[in-house]
């Protein structure tokens, strides 16, 4: 059996409009993300020496080789369904300048892999403008939520989460990624312990579907949820379902509901 190697599957280097409630982060931020091919039987973080991102005008940032948490906002995630690790760092230093950004992974055995993408800010500006002009309408559309709790006779399986899209309110196409976890506040929401992840990037690859997640206005949670439990979810808006093509991610406010 061949020894697993660290290889980059895709990267993101894009603007993030950070709309999480009661967050210390400013609204205009950006992120660097690198997704790795699976390394079955081996923990990818144990094989990595360093990861850095660099770009125009001397831009440089280093990823931490530790599990991501909501305090540091820098580290790795693991997706057990596809056995892959991915690293992300969120930066509070505003939107990116246009230009080419590269993420480079250096392994302990000396091997280096890197990937680049070109950031364009026009698609970012269009999406953020449409979102802000229709913010209240979009926020009020989410169901279930604190304002629209689940009916008392709801089942615990096949619960539907729904919302208005930018297409609905401003005729702007976008893609939607949904994450659900046990949580009653945004601080409790743990991206490494998800109950449901609507992974449109994997759907795009697996199904060869360029429209995976486009203008998606709902997801159904097929997994049976726990009774009398608080759940939180957030729906991320982006302009692509391929990480290397994304110029903007809008982190919408978390929504919360309690199961019967």
Image (cartoon, rainbow, N blue to C red):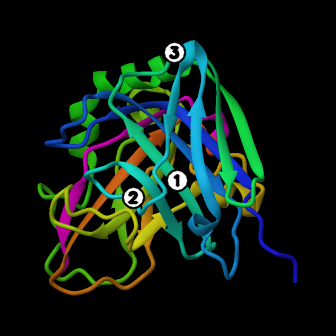
Decide which of tag 3 and tag 2 comes sooner along the chain.
2
Q: Is residue 64 left or right of residue 260?
A: right
Q: Measure the alpha-carbon separation of dots 3 and 1.
A: 22 Å
Decide which of tag 1 and tag 2 comes sooner along the chain.
2
Q: Is residue 134 left or right of residue 230?
A: right
Residue 255 falls within the magenta-colored stretch:
yes
Question: Do labels 1 and 2 touch, CB within 8 Å?
Answer: yes
Q: Secondary structure at mark 1?
A: strand
Which residue is more in the foreground, 196 or 8? 8
Q: Measure the alpha-carbon separation of dots 1 and 2.
A: 8 Å
| Disc sitting over residue 97 in the figure | 3
Question: Do labels 3 and 1 touch, CB within 8 Å?
Answer: no
Where does the C terminus fall, quadrant-wise? bottom left
- Residue beneath disc 1: 87
- Residue beneath disc 2: 68
Badge 3: residue crowd in 10 Å (few <14, some 14–19, many ≥20) = some
């Amino acid at each position: 059996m061949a020894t697993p190697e660290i290889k980059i599957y895709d990267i993101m280097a894009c603007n993030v409009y950070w709309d999480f409630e009661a967050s210390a982060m400013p609204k205009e931020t950006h992120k660097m993300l690198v997704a790795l091919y699976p390394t079955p039987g081996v923990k990818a973080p144990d094989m990595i020496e360093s990861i850095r991102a660099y770009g125009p005008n001397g831009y440089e940032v280093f990823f931490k080789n530790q599990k991501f948490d909501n305090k540091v906002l820098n580290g790795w995630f693991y997706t057990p369904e596809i056995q892959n690790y991915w690293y992300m760092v969120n930066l509070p230093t505003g939107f990116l300048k246009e230009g080419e950004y590269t993420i480079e992974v250096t392994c302990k055995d000396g091997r280096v892999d890197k990937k680049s993408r070109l950031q364009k800010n026009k698609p970012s500006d269009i999406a953020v403008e449409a979102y802000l002009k229709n913010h209240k309408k979009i926020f009020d559309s989410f169901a279930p939520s604190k304002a629209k709790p689940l009916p008392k006779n709801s089942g615990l399986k096949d619960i539907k989460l729904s919302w208005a899209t930018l297409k609905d309110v401003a005729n702007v196409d976008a893609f939607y990624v949904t994450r659900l976890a046990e949580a009653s506040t945004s601080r409790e929401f743990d991206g490494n312990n998800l109950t449901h992840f609507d992974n449109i990037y994997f759907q795009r690859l697996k199904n060869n579907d360029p429209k995976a997640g486009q203008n998606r206005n709902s997801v159904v949670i097929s997994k049976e949820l726990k009774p009398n439990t608080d759940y939180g979810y957030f729906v991320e808006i982006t302009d692509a379902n391929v990480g290397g093509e994304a110029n903007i991610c809008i982190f919408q406010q978390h929504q919360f509901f309690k199961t019967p």
